[in-house]
Image: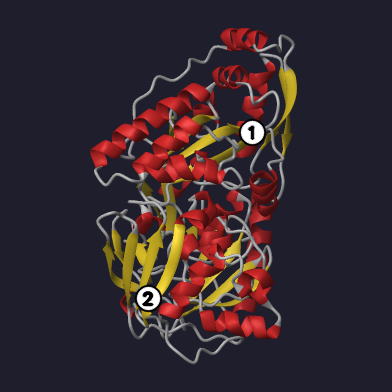
Amino acid sequence: MLRSRHFRLGALAVSLFATLGVMPGAASAATKTIVFCSEGSPAGFDSAQYTTSTDFDAGAHSVYDTLVEFKRGSLDLVPGLAEKWDEAPDARSFTFHLRRGVKFQSTAYFKPTRDFNADDVVFTFKRMIDPNEPFQKAHPVSFPYLTDLGYDKNIASVEKLDDFTVRFTLKTPDVVFVRNIAMEFASIVSAEYVAQLLKAGKPEDINQKPVGTGAFVFRDYQKDATIRYDANPTYWNKKDLHIDKLVFSITPDAAVRMQKLASGECQLTSFARPADIATARKDPKLAVLSGVGFNVAYVGYNTTHKPLDNVLVRRALDMAVDKQAIIKTVYEGAATVATNPMPPSQWSYKALKDAPYDPAKARALLKEAGFPDGFAITLWAMPVQRGYNPNARLMAQLIQSDWAKIGVKANIVSYEWAEYNKRAKTGGEHDAILYGWLGDNGDPDNWLGTTLGCDAVHGSNMAKWCNKQFDDLLAKARLVPDQKARTRLYEEAQVVFKDQVPYTPIAHANTYQPISKRVHGYLISPLGGHRFDGITLD
């Protein structure tokens, strides 16, 4: 049965790659083509509108650049579209000196007439923060990461000082600002291209026909099948561009992704299951890269829904989850138990005592909260593998069984990935939800503010939890440049989190990346996601 299935997959792949002009095992004969087996279809290519690595891989990591970047495989900041930057002593003003001679990509639908300049930076941010900006009026969409950070309120102005100098002024100090705008949501778009879209009455095309300054030029997208890119012939950082074409082969089934990797139909794959790692290590054609897991998986409690607004109920559900069983069954041991909303490798992590797994005490807490006979809720399970959770459906089933022991009936719900995010983030439809976080910038605020802060309740704060004491601690930490002082504030915030249990941290997954030995120079990012610049192919 397995052999027959693999044969059908191979036949389909030959047909697919023939259509693309790429044949497995011979990709480098005429051109060097990297095929990436991705886990799902992107919701779109305008990275400002999204928060997941599925969308960032397809958009920000391929097509766009940011003013400041993270060095590949590192948390260190390096120049991007800005060659250098200056920060005012009060952390309220930031001036970026832009790189000259950078060209926007030329595509079938856009031919730039000028190079990148300050106008593009000003537009990129004004369209997100200014409700009166014409493009935002013509194309009213949300910018969840920007609002999760509170920048829709805190950025007072974005000024063009000259063609290659831009100054950001904030209403309140933010020592994390430069790290934050190195993230994918701040990808720089072409003001000239946007003006063309407005004139044509097609502003929504920015999300389906992207134009950036990045390493790869978008060519076409067949939903749930493939995305094709060509190397950018005018890329400003050509020393890091060594392949000619990039293809995303969208493959939701993790087992099929591994089969394609083993057969040479793809050279990189996303989010391998723990069981596949041992198999990959035995394959002489494959290598397995590994790194420290900079992530957390959790089950979140929608604190705006009864009875989850009751902290006693949340504590009961927390104590009823057998984390060790989940580590053994879902991760096959390739993870550590999580107690905090950030991993131990993040500076300012505070070692906290976890609540014991104690169903009897959990039932007693429910009785104290007024629910001696339990209650029924929905438990949402992700439809895709993530770096922090290799099998959300299985994890949901284990938690469902755990909660049944204390009288809580959990009905497992799932949706297609883009719909899952939309319904949970903007709609808040869930009761309990399986989710997680991959660190985005190496700062504690990214774990605490972006996923638990009051500004993020309509975005990545899946608990919809707004706690003044917690939020005030984060606000103070953004004002203080001294790391020791910030650490003390973040430690206090973690104590508040642990007491109030807006979500139950479950695991920090180990990071593994199976890869073809034909690929060289690929580095695992501690921030998650996949970058394709800097890699070569035999």
| SS for dot 2 | loop
What is the quadrant of residue 257 in the picture? Answer: bottom right
Residue picked out by circle 2: 241
Q: Is residue 26 left or right of residue 68?
A: right
Percent position of residue 419, x then y? 70, 51
Q: Is residue 327 left or right of residue 303?
A: left
| SS for dot 1 | loop
- What amino acid is at disc 1? Asn
Q: Residues within 10 Å of mark 2 (few under 14, many from 20)?
A: some
321 in relation to 411, above or below: above
- What amino acid is at disc 2? Leu
Residue picked out by circle 1: 302
Numbered disc in front, either 1 or 2: 1
Q: Is residue 497 left or right of residue 485?
A: right
Q: Residues within 10 Å of mark 1 (few under 14, many from 20)?
A: many
Percent position of residue 75, x then y? 32, 53
Res. 15 visible in picture: no
Percent position of residue 63, x then y? 49, 72
Res. 500 visible in picture: yes
Marks 1 and 2 close (CB-CB < 8 Å): no
Q: Is residue 216 left or right of residue 402?
A: left
350 in relation to 234, above or below: above
433 in relation to 198, above or below: above
Quarter that holds the C terminus: bottom left
